[in-house]
Image (cartoon, helix red, strand yellow):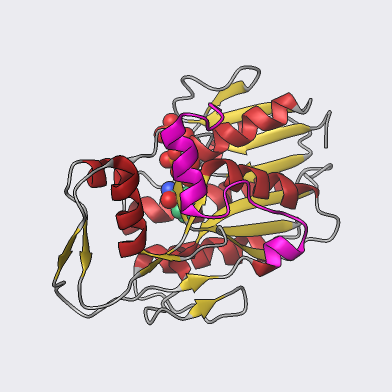
Amino acid sequence: MAGETILVAGCGYVGSALAARLVEEGDRVFGLSRSPGALPQGVQPIAADLGDPKCARMLPEPLDRVFYTAAADDGSEAAYRRAYVDGLGNLLVALEVRPRPPRRVLFTSSTSVFHQSDGSWVDEASPTEPGHHRGRVMLEAEARLLQSPLVGVALRLGGIYGPGRTRLLESVRAGRATYDSRGPRYTNRIHRDDAASALIHLARLAQPAPLYLGVDDDPAERAAVLGWLARRLGAPEPRAEVGSGPLDAGKRCRNERLRESGWSPEFPSYRDGYAAMLAGSAPGR
Ligand SMILES: NC(=O)c1ccc[n+]([C@@H]2O[C@H](COP(=O)([O-])OP(=O)(O)OC[C@H]3O[C@@H](n4cnc5c(N)ncnc54)[C@H](OP(=O)(O)O)[C@@H]3O)[C@@H](O)[C@H]2O)c1
């Protein structure tokens, strides 16, 4: 891919890590956001709002590959729709009519598309009937991408963590972390750098599938994650509380398709990723 012209649309936490890697590998990289402040060195900023159809005027031409990594401003349905359905749609409309369209468009979807709450294993073939608008809007955006004449790949990411994304860690350190005593709740995550490497891998893969789950190897119980962090931090043992509402055991996301395509995570478990963060040894991308 080196020497290509790449757009990272929504160049935030994951997008910047991705953009930095691509610059290192010799690509010409544009990082787009409404307020592109501190982008990694070598990434050329584009200030534009993807929610505005006119944003297409700001895009370089031609583009070899496009990564869509924009995120909603908040959890409301309107914000979700603007970021994922409208934003991605605006970009696709502009790219689809180009005489030389990009060879591939990668979209960061989410494991929130799954409704399963009984702790069962899910993969790309599992049903998705989300009760919440977050999952429904993501599915709509995926469908838009996969209906496009462009080659699109959606990567459903688990919870992203890594340097600077330390909310869980800080809640454990402060003794505020709790878990539901009524039963296990499975959680799925991926380290920022593994999300970036998976996207680059899929952008280069000869014959990608349209859909992948982007998670580590370890869909771990929340209580186990909190307990492990507490021991590493020397923090108080997280508290078990009787939860309210129906018991939600979550789901366990399988990364087999992504792994079998040739990708492997640098941080296969939360233990690897958090240990690197605590040691301060995670790359500072
Ligand atoms: N965070 C998670 O745990 C998680 C889990 C699953 C999937 N994902 C997905 O993974 C992707 C990357 O997440 P992230 O954590 O890297 O997100 P992030 O740090 O919030 O970055 C999102 C970027 O999108 C830009 N953006 C948002 N709306 C825009 C618009 N209308 N026009 C132009 N730029 C816009 C933001 O910059 P400005 O505000 O300056 O425009 C920001 O740079 C997102 O698609 C997210 O939905 C995240």
Could you say where residue 184 lies in the image, as x and y percent from the top left?
32, 74
Instruction: Locate residue 209, reporting x and y percent.
Output: 74, 65
The quadrant of the rendering that contains the N terminus is top right
Q: Residue at x 17, y 77 (%)?
A: 245
Between residues 87 and 9, which one lies in front from this camera angle?
9
Residue 213 lies, in percent from the top left, at: 59, 63
Residue nearer the viewer, 62 or 129: 129
Q: Is residue 104 magenta?
A: no
Magenta stretch, residue numbers: 257-285
Residue 96 in view (yes/no): no
Q: Residue at x 66, y 18 (%)?
A: 42
Q: Looking at the picture, tell me which residue is in the foreground, 166 or 49.
A: 166
Residue 157 position (above or below residue 233): below
Coordinates of residue 273 in the picture (x, y in percent): 50, 45
Asked whether 269 falls inside the magenta stretch, the response is yes
* Left or right, 51 with reference to 44: left
| Total numbered labels | 0
